[in-house]
Amino acid sequence: MKVPLLDLHEQLKPLRDEIVAAVTGVIDSTTYIMGPKVEELERAVAAYSGAAHGIGVASGTDALLAVLMTIGVGRGDLVLTTPYSFFATMGCILRLGARPLFVDIDPVSYNIDPTLIEEALAVDPARTARIKAIIPVHLYGQCADMARIMAIADRYHIPVVEDAAQAIGAACPMPVAGTTVWRRAGSMGLAGCFSFFPSKNLGGVGDGGMIVCQDAGFAERTRVIRVHGGAPKYHHGVVGGNFRLDPIQAVVLSIKLPHLDSWHRQRRENAARYRRLFRESGLEDGRVKLPVAVYEAAASEAGGHPDYHIYNQFVIRAERRDELRSYLQAREIGVEVYYPIPLHRQECLAGMDYEGLSYPVSEGAAAETLALPIFPELTAAMQEQVVAAIVAFYAQGT
Ligand SMILES: Cc1ncc(COP(=O)(O)O)c(C=O)c1O
């Protein structure tokens, strides 16, 4: 049996009629740009995330770009971020003429390491003054250590932009007035950026994205940036872009949003099944390392059901990763490497003084990680097949 990395057919089936009717409704309405359907989704996603405002945009990339434009990031500025992410995290910084200042990741969570952020900010006050934003990425569906990141950023008065493209709904514990509250991705920094790319836990039928934030003024300025900086129309006090979300995507996402928590739950159940299967396989002797859900223990202590990890990806670390990947792909098991080249090694940075830099934890992760299928409708039989194939690979020896 083929085991795809992601199969959207099963998710679509029960929703298809509703989606087709809603898309037809948009077409018949002739309101094709923005309008009430986009506003409805903005309110729903903001409420879901625990944010006051939602601003629908055309992609997760545009969400990051528009937020950095609203902050005023430009030539000569630095944005502190992780070297272990999808290209868009860095691409938006470079497109504005600014430069990424990389800080390595934590080897357990793969998220940016707050201790290293603190060290980087202490190096040179003149350099720190050029840092206009910090972008933690909530990689694979698990929040970065936002409690520590926010405390550090607040001390330096640097805004935090959460790249929550992979993490809508994921929650982490935050200290608030002597107690701990669980906050969802996007609701903690100045702004949070979501992607509705079809492979995300909440995916559209094409590209889409959303910015969420708490501050009404920031939301308003970002809404202006979304429409070429025009406010009122045809009066451009600032330069923006066309970053609008399409109402066809908005109606599809509004239909899917109420199902998101149950999809997250199914992904966590699949993760638990992988953990059991790998435990039984005997492969956790160093050949395979499973992802660590760093907030899981705190979530069970907290009671209730905080979404401590939404498993957009289930990423293992594997000995002889590249050989294992080829072996699984040859047996029609969908796996992928997120990401094979850390951002500081990307060719587009040539000539910008990144050549000599090394971020060993990111480089190690890029060489050893492998994402396994984890989508909600994945069956137990498929997971057994994935683990059995990995067992068979290592059984062959070198
Ligand atoms: C971490 C991260 N940032 C940004 C993006 C960009 O989102 P989009 O593909 O919607 O532009 C993605 C999506 O792939 C992502 O995974």
Image: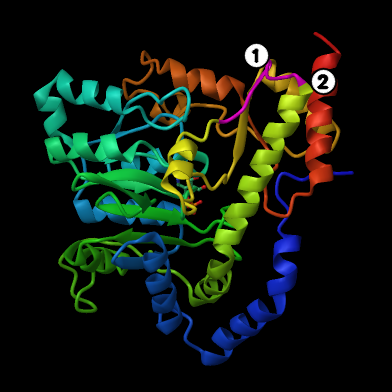
Element carrying mark 2: helix
Element carrying mark 1: loop
Label 1 neighbour load within 10 Å: few <14, some 14-19, many 20+: few
User: What's the residue at 77%, 45% (across, down)?
Assistant: 4
| Three-letter amino acid code of the residue under disc 2 | Phe
Q: Seen in the image, is 366 located left or right of residue 62?
A: right
Number of disc labels:
2
Quadrant position of the N terminus in the picture = top right
Quadrant position of the C terminus in the picture = top right
Which colour scheme appears in the figure? rainbow
Give the quarter of the image for residue 156. Answer: top left
Q: Position of residue 250 (x, y in %)?
A: 50, 73
Question: The magenta stretch spans which residues?
Answer: 282-291
Q: Nearer the viewer, mark 2 or mark 1?
A: 1
Name the residue tied to disc 1.
Answer: 286
Outermost residue to the top: 398
Q: Is residue 263 magenta?
A: no
Image: 356 above or below 336:
above
Name the residue tied to disc 2.
Answer: 393
User: What's the residue at 52%, 91% (across, down)?
Assistant: 29
